[in-house]
Amino acid sequence: MTLSYADHPALQGDFEPARYDASLYDCEVIGEIPAALNGTFYRACAEWFYPPRYPDDSPFAADGMITAFRIGDGSCDYAARFIETPRYLANKAARRQLFGYYRNPFTHEPPMQGQYNKADTVSNTNVIFFAGRLLALKEDAPPMEIDPDTLETKGFFDFGGDYKAPTFSAHPKVDGRTGEMITFGYEAEGLATNAIWIYTIDAGGKVTSERKLSAPYLSMVHDIAISQNYILIPVYGMVSSMERLREGKVHWGWDTTLPSHIGVLPRHGDASDIRWFDGPAMAMVHTFAASDEGGVITLDAAVSDGNPFPFFPDVHGKPFDPAGARTTIRRYVIDMNASGGGWREERMWQDKPGALSRIDERFMGHRFRHGLLSFSDETKPFSGDMGSRRPTNSLGRFDFATGEVEAMFAGPEFGLQEIAFAPRSPDAPEADGWVMALGTNYETMKSELLIGDTANLAAGPVARVRLPFRAPQQVHGNWVPAWSRGA
Ligand code: V55
Ligand code: FE
């Protein structure tokens, strides 16, 4: 049996699989890690332990890994570990990839054929610390609990059986003041169903409500937003059906002909209180956050007009359009007092593509002013080679009130992953603290964690934590302050 990645053009260079667990005490640091920075930067990563069964499969089906940068007293220790999902363990036992296309159980090798949810999830999308537990998330299955210290896999977690949906979003929202989680599962009544089940879970981990919705049509619901009074649910033309799954296709296809929708559910209302607003085709894969006042909701998000994912083909056979995939920051204004069912769209920051959008999460569900993002500043030099692609090279703090951005350029050798934000103290002003992101140094092809201070982003990184190898590819990650773990 051969095991090789050579036939997989997408798994070369920076994307060559990092197949190892790792543990590294006291990393090399250039500059100085701020003495007051105390906590752990957890990253959820996607790495093919065995190559995909189909070379054109989506990277979303790569195995989940968790990495941890533990920072305190100016030092940093590093650890990385594969998540032991049932799929990862079955593949290891068979010494090959038993599973077919992303979220298509009809394409799995017998005896895995037809098995999905807990059987074929890769738990690779996000990692959060909530109610005393570290949870790795993937939107096609329940959370996977991970030991926050050893990174060992503990198993699926369903909040004592009170979380009933078979799926759980990778982007739950936690109210920055109350600590309440608003989360959901979609395809909640089985594969290719348009059921979305919304849950609230209190800060102690107790499920406090369940609401069952039907979307206008089945689409990827990767992220939602919460404001003070509402839950916002975007639905857009990333579609699926049992028919396409039976035909042996990758789960999602893009359909430009469909209108998009935003569902508005009162945070404390019933499922029947949902109102669906409609607009032209767009893809709102990720949101920054939302806020409302006097019944007028503003929802800020990085949005594209067309298909953002080249590996999810157009259902009408149109070729992939890179221009349509470009995300820009937009504000959606929804007036709950108006009788109409539309929204007003304002385009806010148009010249910097690839924005990975976050806010200071202490302000989630409340009035906020700043976005925090990784982006590609195409005016800056790049000393590496990515072919026609341009690297994500900057971390920014965007001011929604003025439209201004302050930015930290990582340096010409770096390609960055998603930003994480560490508040300076529990009650520091909004977006005041440190930003960080993992980067590949294209001169060494090794990874570095770059840390900047929001007080002077233009000065560049204050510390570079250098790993003697390339770390796995991040999807999403979060800074978990020591104070939030009661440490
Ligand atoms: C996304 C990512 C996923 C997934 C579904 O970025 C949507 C969107 C990394 O996995 O499974
Ligand atoms: Fe995401």
Image: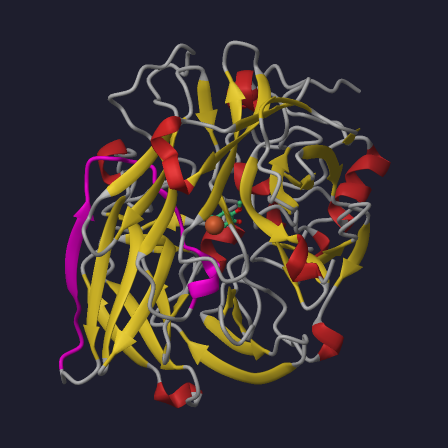
- Work out which quarter of the rendered image holds the N terminus and state it: top right
Percent across and percent down for residue 349 are: 20, 44
Q: How many marks?
A: 0
Question: Taking the image as drawn, is residue 197 in sight?
Answer: yes
- Work out which quarter of the rendered image holds the C terminus and state it: bottom right
Percent across and percent down for residue 336 are: 21, 82
Percent across and percent down for residue 389 are: 35, 22
Please name whichever residue, 286 or 10, is drawn nearer the observer in this view of the structure: 286
- Quarter-wise, where is residue 376 in the image? top left
- Quarter-wise, where is residue 280 in the image? bottom left
Could you tell whether 377 is left or right of 445 in the image? left
Please name whichever residue, 478 or 275, is drawn nearer the observer in this view of the structure: 478
Please name whichever residue, 350 or 214, is drawn nearer the observer in this view of the structure: 350
- Residue name at image x 33 percent, y 72 percent: 216
- Residue name at image x 41 percent, y 19 percent: 411
Percent across and percent down for residue 451 are: 51, 33
Position of residue 49 relative to residue 269, above or below, is above
The stretch drawn in magenta includes residue 348: yes
In the image, the segment drawn in magenta is: 340-364
Position of residue 470 relative to residue 119, above or below, is above
Color style of the picture: secondary structure
The stretch drawn in magenta includes residue 217: no
Could you tell whether 291 is left or right of 52 in the image? left
In this view, the residue farthest toward the right is: 93
Could you tell whether 396 is left or right of 426 in the image? left
- Quarter-wise, where is residue 277 in the image? bottom left
In this view, the residue farthest toward the front is: 35
Question: Taking the image as drawn, is residue 126 in sight?
Answer: no
